[in-house]
Image (tube, rainbow, N blue to C red):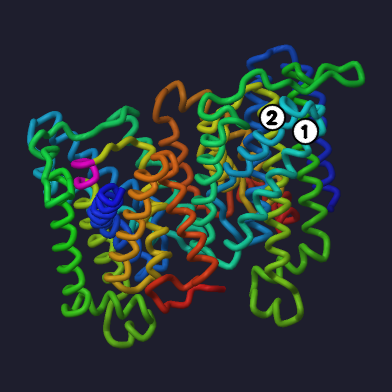
């Protein structure tokens, strides 16, 4: 990392951990907006990881989000697993769900994207029909919140904010490390030419599956966190297409080839959507997001962050 | 029990007609442009909502909505074509995301205009029973099945006999060679989007005439169309028709023998099975594996 980047990252950390809680820490409305935005960012980042490193566009990340949420909720409510462990196991659940998707990796490009969309529906139907475990379409309520620890209440709005912020930043760090590792090098080479990379002895299918696993695991954790944050789940909510749509818009907007792009994009897109579009168009406000997505793909497919911040953007490219 | 099963087979067959129209539209565009139009289901749904408006606001039979739907849906389809054409870098993935975005726009626009309520036709003429021996169907189902078969036959004739149809197939199978033979690929792509719009218009009006629609349904339709093309293996019209009937029958049998909630699941299972066992589809020899 160059010094300029170090400074920018440091500034961002000070802003996120210091300035924001100091200014708005006691305003539940602002905090809940930020938590929701970070949850979107927490899905946008693994989505972009899969797209950038794995070369796969997924329209089915809502499956991982929902599976993570349900795994964690069921474990904590029916099997008395402590919430923090349950959240991690939610990620494991989403990883297991991604195992089922492995045969889809045989398909390329558009076929993969659509097959994974079909998978998302399968998991939603299972969650609705397996009512003895999931409560069916009625859903599950009073899911326990994250308990207090070290004398700090992580169930509060401020606590949830700090927790999801930390989770998301850990993801970003993991993404960064992954990209610098020899896996990252091989994956970058695969993007140039998958055949050539295979010839020099890289198992491209294995690497792609690894990216799918990492992406699913991260998404599952965020889904699980969300379940304990809102304390309620129903299939229609947990597997809603919105959990993949908003992250896609966010990642494309911020630049899905960068690490911070999806996060910054998520905060921006979510806040603008909630504060402006939603007040203008209460029921169909996602129309604007769709239009934004279309405009970004046509005019600036690499994202706004890369355009606006050249020196910052370049180093963060894969 | 046998009656139930034969009835399910029959209903599935009729449903297969409009499924085939939807799937073919998707397959044609994919053939010429190598782009999966994720907004395709929304185009079908748009036609269905136009049928709803024609029926509820003007009191006409939904079938009269077809001309209006043709105009609006084909124009929308052409708009999608031009937007896809504007994608410059990383076309395969970016055009997917683009059509996904268009799908979001369309479904939310429909939500704004027609609200989230579930709609279905109130035409009593359409809903009247039509009994063939032991088999039962609504008039609308049989009528639109007949229309679908006629369209499919016409399309088959067009693709195999007419100049434009041959050009379209030529571009699908080898774009560069087609260029050398004096075919303008851009024009052919445009034609494929228009034909997809035509197919979507008929399919949409059909869906409204015998089924229920709501704004979120477009996504489901796209997935179904995709499942059919995987079942069929991209390439042949008879293959798509068979794949569509297979999906229709499988869904109808599930509803009869198990529960309607599992209807969507069976299509997915069929799809996965085909993916595992014969990845190039049941009827196609086109290479798809990476």
In-image side of B1 versus B50 (left or right): right
Q: Which mark is residue A194?
A: none
Question: In this view, which residue lies farthest toward the front?
Answer: B1
In this rendered view, identify the residue nearer to me: A44 or A135.
A135
Q: Is residue B12 found left or right of B62 in the rendered image?
A: right
Q: Residue at x 39, y 57 (%)?
A: B37
Residue B85, given in percent of the width and then of the height, sits at 38, 62
- Judging from the image, mark 2 belongs to the subunit labelled A
Crowding near the residue tagged with mark 1, few <14, some 14–19, many ≥20 C-alpha atoms within 10 Å: many
Separation (CA) of disc 1 from disc 2: 7 Å
Question: Does the magenta segment cover residue A188?
Answer: no
Q: From this viewpoint, which residue is outermost toward the top?
A: A26
Residue at mark 2: A73
Chain where mark 1 sits: A
As rendered, which of B2 and A105 lies closer to the eye? Answer: B2
The local secondary structure at tag 2 comes to helix
Main secondary structure found in the magenta portion: helix
Q: Which residues are magenta?
A: B205-210
B36 above or below B168? above
Residue B75 can be seen in this image: no
Q: Position of residue B216 (x, y in %)?
A: 39, 38
Q: Secondary structure at mark 1?
A: helix
Front position in the image: A102 or A111: A102
Q: Quadrant of residue A202?
A: bottom right
User: Circle 1 sits on which residue?
Assistant: A86
């Amino acid at each position: 990392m160059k010094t300029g980047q170090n400074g920018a990252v440091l500034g961002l950390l000070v802003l996120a951990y210091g300035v924001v809680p100091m200014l708005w820490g006691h305003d539940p409305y602002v905090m809940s907006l930020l938590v929701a935005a970070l949850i979107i960012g927490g899905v946008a980042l693994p989505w972009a990881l899969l797209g950038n490193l794995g070369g796969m566009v997924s329209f089915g990340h809502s499956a991982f989000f929902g599976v993570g949420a349900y795994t964690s909720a069921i474990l904590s409510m029916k099997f008395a697993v402590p919430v923090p462990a349950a959240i991690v196991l939610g990620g494991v659940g989403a990883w297991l769900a991604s195992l089922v998707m492995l045969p889809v990796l045989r398909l390329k490009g558009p076929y993969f994207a659509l097959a994974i969309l079909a998978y998302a529906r399968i998991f939603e139907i299972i969650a609705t029909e397996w009512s003895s475990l999931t409560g069916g379409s009625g859903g599950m309520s009073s899911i326990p919140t994250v308990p207090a620890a070290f004398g700090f209440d992580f169930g509060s709005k401020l606590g949830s904010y700090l927790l999801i912020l930390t989770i998301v930043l850990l993801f970003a760090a993991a993404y960064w490390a992954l990209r610098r590792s020899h896996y990252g090098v091989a994956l970058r080479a695969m993007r140039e030419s998958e055949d050539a990379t295979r010839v020099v002895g890289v198992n491209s299918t294995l690497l792609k599956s690894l990216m799918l696993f990492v992406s699913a695991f991260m998404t599952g954790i965020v889904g699980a966190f969300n379940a304990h944050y809102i304390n309620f789940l129903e299939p229609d909510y947990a597997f809603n297409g919105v959990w993949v749509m908003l992250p896609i818009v966010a990642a494309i907007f911020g630049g899905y080839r960068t690490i911070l792009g999806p996060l910054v994009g998520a905060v921006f897109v979510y806040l603008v959507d909630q504060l402006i579009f939603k007040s203008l168009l209460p029921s169909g406000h996602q129309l604007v997001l769709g239009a934004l997505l279309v405009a970004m793909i046509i005019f600036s497919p690499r994202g706004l962050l890369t355009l606006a911040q050249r020196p910052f953007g370049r180093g963060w490219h894969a | 029990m046998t009656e139930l099963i034969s009835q399910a087979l029959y209903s599935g067959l009729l449903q297969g007609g409009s499924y085939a129209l939807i799937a073919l539209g998707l397959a044609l565009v994919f053939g010429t442009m190598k782009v999966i139009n994720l907004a395709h289901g929304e185009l079908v749904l748009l036609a269905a909502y136009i049928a709803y408006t024609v029926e509820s606001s003007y009191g006409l039979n939904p079938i009269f909505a077809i001309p209006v739907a043709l105009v609006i849906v084909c124009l929308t389809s052409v708009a999608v074509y031009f937007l896809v054409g504007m994608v410059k870098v990383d076309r395969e993935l970016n055009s997917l995301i683009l059509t996904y975005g268009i799908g979001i726009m369309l479904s939310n626009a429909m939500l704004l205009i027609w609200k989230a309520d579930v709609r279905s036709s109130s035409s009593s003429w359409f809903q009247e029973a039509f009994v063939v021996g032991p088999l039962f169907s609504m008039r609308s189902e049989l009528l639109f099945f007949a229309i679908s078969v006629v369209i499919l036959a016409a399309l088959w004739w067009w693709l195999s006999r007419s100049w434009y149809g041959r050009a379209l197939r030529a571009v699908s199978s080898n774009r560069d060679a087609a260029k050398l033979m004096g075919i303008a690929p851009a024009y052919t792509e445009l034609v494929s989007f228009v034909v997809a719009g035509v197919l979507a218009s008929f399919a949409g009006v059909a869906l409204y005439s015998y089924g229920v629609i709501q704004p979120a349904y477009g996504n489901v339709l796209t997935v179904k169309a995709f499942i059919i093309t995987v079942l069929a293996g991209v390439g042949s019209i008879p293959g798509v028709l068979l794949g569509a009937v297979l999906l229709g029958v499988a869904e109808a049998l599930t509803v009869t023998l198990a529960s309607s909630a599992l209807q969507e699941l069976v299509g997915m299972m069929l799809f996965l099975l085909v993916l595992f066992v014969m990845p190039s589809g049941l009827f196609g020899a086109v290479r798809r594996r990476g």
